Amino acid sequence: MDMIKNALTVDVEDYFQVAALAEAVEPKDWGTMEYRVEANTDRLLGLFDERDTKATFFTLGWVAERSPNLVRRIQQAGHEIASHGYSHQLIYNQTPKVFREETRKSK
């Protein structure tokens, strides 16, 4: 049987960090919200492991800073880690200065 090759990516962010909620939940309030990203990502890591599937995990710098062990678990499971910025700001709304700072902080 031929194997089908696909690209699989995961955004490692929490429900309150999506652009649709940007007007309702400010980044300064993120630390007060119920934090679900670790349990949800661990669930995906388990499913991917069962199916011997690898993915690229686009991780918010804010999440990586708060949960460095989560980033380590992703890496130890053999997945690629990529940047999703620091605070999930839409790139076309960023000035070059903000983009540089977001990139620096997320690294």
Image (spheres, rainbow, N blue to C red):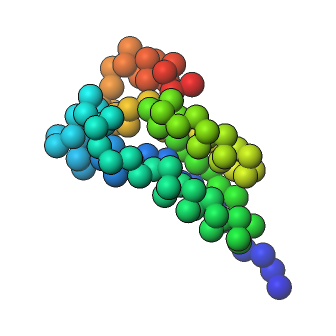
User: Residue 50 placed where, x, y %?
Assistant: 70, 71
Vertical comparison of 98 with 92: above or below: above
User: Residue 105 placed where, x, y %?
Assistant: 49, 21
Q: Does residue 80 appear in the picture of this structure?
A: no
> Front-most of 53 and 35?
35
Q: Residue furthest top?
A: 97
Q: Does residue 26 appear in the picture of this structure?
A: yes
Q: Residue at x 17, y 40 (%)?
A: 23
Q: Residue furthest right?
A: 1
Q: Residue at x 33, y 25 (%)?
A: 94
Q: Residue furthest left?
A: 24
Residue 83 image-quadrant placement: top right
Quadrant placement of the N terminus: bottom right
> Front-most of 99 and 80?
80
> Front-most of 86 and 14?
14
* Residue 39 left/right relative to 27: right
> Front-most of 13 and 94?
13
* Residue 77 left/right relative to 44: right
Quadrant placement of the C terminus: top right
User: Residue 30 placed where, x, y %?
Assistant: 30, 36
Residue 72 image-quadrant placement: top right
Q: Residue furthest bottom?
A: 1
Q: Residue at x 41, y 52 (%)?
A: 36
| Label total for image | 0
User: Residue 40 placed where, x, y %?
Assistant: 49, 58
Q: Residue at x 50, y 49 (%)?
A: 38
